[in-house]
Image (cartoon, rainbow, N blue to C red):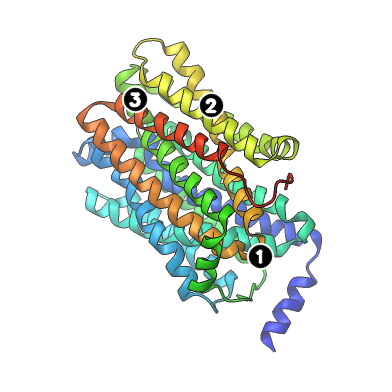
Amino acid sequence: MSQCTTLSSERQMSSLQRWSAVLSLACGTFVLINSEFLPIGLLSPIAKALNVSEGQAGWTVMLPGLIAAFAAPLLMLFSRRLNRRTLLLILSVSVILSNAIAMFATDLSTLLLGRIILGFAAGGFWSFSIPAGKRLVSEAQSARAISLISAGVALGTVAGVPASAYMGELYGWRMAFTLNTLLAVAIFIYQWIALPLLPAGNSIGLSAMLSAAKMKGVRRGLIIGIFMASAQYSAYTYLEPWLRFQMHFSSSSISLLLMGYGIAGFIGTFLTEFTVRKFGVRYAFLTNILFIGVCVLIASQLSSNQVLASVLIVIWGLAFGALPICLNIWIYQAAPELFEGGSALLVCVFQLALACGAFFGGFLADTQGTYAAFILGGVLALIAGLSIFLSHPKSTTNY
């Protein structure tokens, strides 16, 4: 009876209420991904404050990805009957807690504890938010809802680093985590008000996830996601040390450059819907990943040309802003009827690849220099491009 009531309530929502709920999910993905990548712009200050190397400080990016990779499918399996509104709110509270712990951390172990909690939230929220958003609107509007929530992922990715670098420059790295905690609290309140009850509906079990994995388009999307995430985060995690120690930018210039990266990513995010509709997801995806590969490889060889380095950073941000949206649309086109299971698998492989990229990039940065991490990222991006060139989602139509 209660499930019928909640379904009826969901159907009676106005269009404005539906899109407000979708927007609350987009804000949630933004603050979550912003939290996940916040340390990238603060890597050197964190390393100095906690008396560790930049590679060790990179564990703050690697560890949440590793935890999220396992949390995504496990949460999918063990929350099969839990109302999605309740689950999403619990995960939002986890984001608040993780940032609060980081805010007061006095050593690397405490900071990593907060990052473990964040990994739990990342694995779950990313898996459930996009399918939940798709349910809130009509089938004809589902692609737009996916784009909006994915835009939260993309914007969190490109905005977290410049925002943290700027705040760290002005007030110290702890203040960046403090402000992010307050932002997470505000978004939690918004979600509490905006989200309707969302019954679990058809339970997604292990067999459903395996069924999604058996679909050729999904498998190809997962392979692309592995190379894409490992490419991006083997280099991007160490962007701030590269700018500081290899390119010799000042702290204020680094903040401005990272802000330029974020603004370019913001533009790239909102250009994606047009480019996918115009050229198809495959070609939009391929073009942007190749831009990243070429930019990162050229950047790895620079040591003094700050103007060229600045141009490459902006192009990199513009291209990466499109990639999370392209990847989610790819999976949706490949398995629209199994999208929740496919989304969990995508989060699993993406976060695992992110963790591996950050780990091996950190190893190279500590032993060879940040240029070596960039070479690894560039090569992996070109492999991702080759994977896209040889593949296509199940549907060849634009959306």
Q: Earlier in the sequence, mark 1 or mark 3?
A: 3
Choose between 285 and 160: the one closer to the eye.
Answer: 285
Location of residue 345 with respect to 370 vertically, above or below = below
Q: Quadrant of the N terminus?
A: bottom right
Q: Amino acid at mark 2?
A: Phe
Residue 70 lies left or right of residue 124; in this view the side is left
How crowded pointer 3 is (Cα within 10 Å; few <14, some 14-19, many 20+) is rated as: many
Where residue 154 appears, as percent x and y from the top left, is: 56, 42
Q: CA distance from mark 1 to mark 3?
A: 43 Å
The residue that label 2 is drawn on is 291
Tell me the tag on residue 337: 1
Q: CA distance from mark 2 to mark 3?
A: 19 Å
Q: CA distance from mark 2 to mark 1?
A: 32 Å
Location of residue 350 with respect to 293 vertically, above or below = below
Quadrant of residue 296 within the rendered picture: top left
Which residue shows up at 50% across the image and 41% down it? Answer: 157
The residue that label 3 is drawn on is 242
Choose between 241 and 184: the one closer to the eye.
Answer: 241
Which residue shows up at 33% across the image and 51% down it? Answer: 102
Location of residue 387 with respect to 190 vertically, above or below = above
